[in-house]
Amino acid sequence: MKTTTLYRPVGPEELALIKQAGWKAFPPRLPDQPIFYPVMNEDYAIQIARDWNVRASGSGFVTRFEVDAAYLSRFEEQIVGSAVHRELWVPAEELEEFNRHMIGQIEVTRGFPETT
C-alpha cells in the first residue's frame, strides 16, 4: 500500500487527546471547527506550531503520520498562501474515517518553544 506523509501542528490539549487515543487518531473537531486540515510539509507545520500554537497556548507541536494515498486522493490539495502553505481540507464529519485510513502511529517530530 502506498502512503502519503502528512503533518499536523497541534497545541498541548490536542496532543493530550492524541496520546489518550494511543497515538492512532486525531480527536473530533469542536463545533466551531468544520474542517480538519493536515498539512503537506513539515516546514508549514513548524510555522504554525511555532508562530500560532505557542502564542495561543504556550506550546506547539508538529506531528507526522502516514495515510493511505488512495484514500487521500479524494481530497483536493489547497494552497492557502505561498507555495509552502499546502493543506488538505477534510470535513469534520469525515475525520473518523480519515483516522481509520492512517497507517501506523502519529509521532511528534518537533516541540516549541524549543528547550536547549
Image (cartoon, helix red, strand yellow):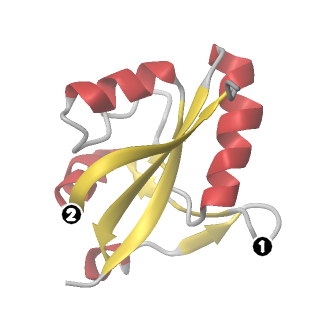
Say which of 4 and 81 sits in front.
4
The residue depicted at 69 percent of the width and 58 percent of the height is 43
- Estimate the x, y position of residue 7 in percent, counting from the top left: 50, 55
Q: Quadrant of residue 4?
A: bottom left
Callout 1: helix, strand or loop?
A: loop
The span from disc 2 to disc 1 (Cα, nearest Å) is 26 Å
Say which of 104 and 78 sits in front.
104
Q: Which mark is residue 107?
A: none
Apparent side of residue 61 relative to residue 48 in the rendered image (left or right): left
Say which of 63 and 26 sits in front.
63
- Estimate the x, y position of residue 104 in percent, counting from the top left: 21, 58
Read off the residue under disc 2.
101
The residue depicted at 20 percent of the width and 55 percent of the height is 97
Q: Which mark is residue 83?
A: 1
Which is nearer the N-term, disc 2 or disc 1? Answer: 1
Q: Amino acid at mark 2?
A: His
Q: Is residue 37 visible?
A: no
Instruction: Give the class, few, some or many, for how many residues have Cα within 10 Å of label 1's Cα (few <14, many ≥20).
Output: few
In the rendered image, the vertical position of residue 20 relative to residue 45, given as above or below:
above
Callout 2: helix, strand or loop?
A: loop
In the rendered image, the vertical position of residue 57 relative to residue 8, given as above or below:
above
Apparent side of residue 27 relative to residue 35 in the rendered image (left or right): left
